[in-house]
Amino acid sequence: MKPLVTIIVPVKNEEKTIEQCLRSLQALNYPNYEIIVVNDGSIDSTEQILKRFDTITVLHTEGVGPSMARNLAIEKAKGEYLAFTDGDCLVDKEWLNQLLAYFTHTTVIGVGGDQLQPENETAFGKDVHEFFSLIAFSSDYLKTKKEVMPIRHNPTCNMMYRSAAFKEIGHFKKDLWPCEDLEFDRRLIQSGYKLIFNPKAIVYHYRPGNLKKFGKFHFRYGRAHAKLVLKYGFIEKIHCIPPLLLFLLVMAVVLFLYSPVSVVIISACFLISPLVYFLLKGKDFIAALKYYRLLFTTVITWTAGFIRGLADKNIWE
């Protein structure tokens, strides 16, 4: 008998994708698993769609947030392994087999996988996915190397842990979202455990559908990362963005007092360099302009969220 796996899916207002998500989970090529969906206060037709799936356990909460929603499902889970994905993801039929394949030693506490584009992704969503791939060096959200390797973090849209991890380390921090999975993985690594990335464990992830949603996505991440900095210090490469921007601003003001023209020239070079990078990577000027707009939006909204996060009174519980 294969080990029992509990698949946990927190959802809120996912009427556009949740049925596809659950259909893909039901089509998994694995004989022994259960699915727990946490409907966290949806006000669209998500609840009605979930009623079509009578073999799936559904928990109902009133907007407690993804971290607490996952924790509630963990308490109900019966599996030896807990696999996590999101309501805007579809899974490959070999997803569970590929994740389980690399629990090769007791020190391996978690295995994650790759994120690809769904076939019916929107044009904007495809641009976002390509943009994420191009700037993947700045975070652990997407992996550019397509090989099995140790990692420090893999997001919970595509991750499996031994259930014992939550008994030993504790659960996700209920007041931290997003980045609760990043913080949890940090505790695992510090406890001497290993995390593995397997690119053959695939989910197809829908991205924000427009620029406004994209901006809100990064604002939330910036705010959460500020809380990580307040708790642990500068632990991620992306945490260098706010102090770097502040340093550049101060240098520009100082330099302007001595040579205004040089400030204009240096600023122009600095602002155009990302466009050149995107152009060299993709050989497409129109696409480079799209990625440049996404980068500008990312820096502005993420930094705004980071500043907002620094002002929050409570870090998390």
Image (cartoon, rainbow, N blue to C red):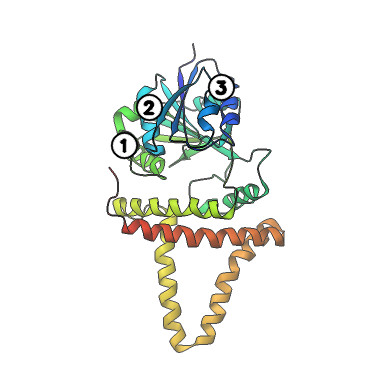
Q: Is residue 283 left or right of residue 192?
A: right
- 204 w.r.t. 275: above or below: above
The residue that label 2 is drawn on is 74
Residue occupying the point 41% across, 52% down = 236
Mark sitting earlier along the chain (1/3): 3
Mark sitting earlier along the chain (2/1): 2
**Disc 2 crowd, CA 10 A, few/some/many (<14, 14-19, 20+):** many
The residue that label 1 is drawn on is 191
Q: Quadrant of the C terminus?
A: top left
Residue 253: where, in percent of width, then height? 43, 81
Residue 10 visible from this viewpoint:
yes
Q: Nearer the viewer, mark 2 or mark 1?
A: 2
Residue 290, picture quadrant? bottom right
- 290 w.r.t. 45: above or below: below
Residue type (three-letter) at the residue carrying disc 1 = Ser
Residue type (three-letter) at the residue carrying disc 2 = Ile
Q: Nearer the viewer, mark 1 or mark 3?
A: 3
Residue occupying the point 50% across, 45% down = 141
Residue 147 visible from this viewpoint:
no
Residue occupying the point 55% across, 81% down = 264
As rendered, which of 166 and 18 lies closer to the eye?
Answer: 18
For this orientation, the residue located farthest to the top is 1
**Disc 3 crowd, CA 10 A, few/some/many (<14, 14-19, 20+):** few
Residue occupying the point 58% across, 45% down = 207
Residue 311: where, in percent of width, then height? 32, 59
Q: Is residue 255 left or right of residue 200?
A: left
